[in-house]
Image: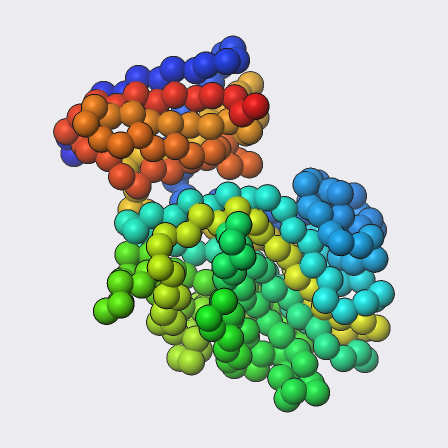
Amino acid sequence: MKKIFLSLFFTLFLLSNISVSFAESNEILIDDFENYKENSNLNGQQDWKSSSNCGIIVSKADSSWRGKILRANSCYYGQQSSKEYVINVSQKMNSFYIQFSGRITAGSGNNSCSMIHIATSDKKIIGFGINHVPSLGINHQLYFFTSKIKKHGKALSANTWYDFRIEIDWSFVNDDNQIGLATFKYKESSKDTWLIDPSLENLELKFEELPVFNRLDARLDGISNRRGELDNILMSYGTNNFFSGCLQYLGNPLSNVNIMIIQTGEYHQKATLDSQGCFKFFDGNEEKPFTVFLRKKE
């Protein structure tokens, strides 16, 4: 590999004891809810916002190997909370994924679900998870949807924790010059092998241009004893990147900071450090030195 010369400049705030590390894993933990107030509404905690306080709650799981989780409250249908979370994608991302754990409990009750959405500012959405609408013949089934796709898949067992993952190849371009190819994977949380429902494989997302997602939604449904539950939201940008790492300040992840790389003759690239202080840039020229600027957000 060619040697890259790196310069770092930190502006508008003083940093000391800062460490730059290149993560061994490309997986980023977005949220596991362990630092949240138990038996309280999700609304108002860690920047999550809901339309009502009668909604998703933070609860202790009934499994010894799982800590705090999100659970649908038994007050009304269609409970959704959202938080700002920026995901910049690149056409060099051929192994991006977002993942979470979820289940629908067994018992009395009607409609229920456990789902995650990511959305753009112009309301383009990718959503996935498990859905239960018995009046429509939908019984604990995999569900994937976008603004252009709505598909149910294999039926799963109630009261069982599953890991759900959407893998997206953003390098895919169809004959109409539309972008994105998605596959829905799932497995029981206690097992290692990922499974694929063939009806939810290689789905063309048909984005006209590369999206910038800026909102994360947790959607849970359920009343009485049949409720959706959700835990451990993860993401990976994949391995095909030019420059990536994680920054810490005094032992804590550096957040609320913009990062920019500059190379002579190349376009400037900007990103925002995520909640773990991590960043990834997918484009760059390995023949040229580059400069990295960090700037505290206003």
Nearer-the-camera pick, 223 or 252: 223
Is residue 72 rendered to the left or right of residue 190? right
Q: Across the whole image, how many numbered discs are drawn on residues?
A: 0
Point 80% across, 50% down: residue: 41
Q: Residue at x 61, y 64 (%)?
A: 115
Q: Is residue 197 above or below residue 44?
A: below
Res 65 seen here: no
Looking at the image, which residue sits at the far front?
Answer: 122
**Residue that appears at 58% across and 51% down:** 216
| Quarter in which the N terminus is drawn | top left
Q: Can residue 23 be seen in this view?
A: yes
Q: Is residue 200 above or below residue 123?
A: below
Q: Name the quarter where the C terminus is drawn.
A: top right
User: What coloring was used for the rendering?
Assistant: rainbow
Residue at horizontal 60 percent and vertical 72 percent from the top: 130
Q: Nearer the viewer, residue 177 or 153?
A: 177
Q: Where is residue 96 in the image (x, y as percent from the top left)?
A: 39, 54
**Residue 133 falls in image quadrant:** bottom right
Q: Horizontal and vertical percent for residue 107?
A: 78, 78
The image position of residue 197, as x and y in percent, is 44, 78
| Left or right: residue 202 compared with residue 120 | left
Left or right: 131 in relation to 10: right
Q: Using the image, determine if residue 226 lies above or below residue 73.
A: below
Q: Is residue 75 left or right of residue 280?
A: right
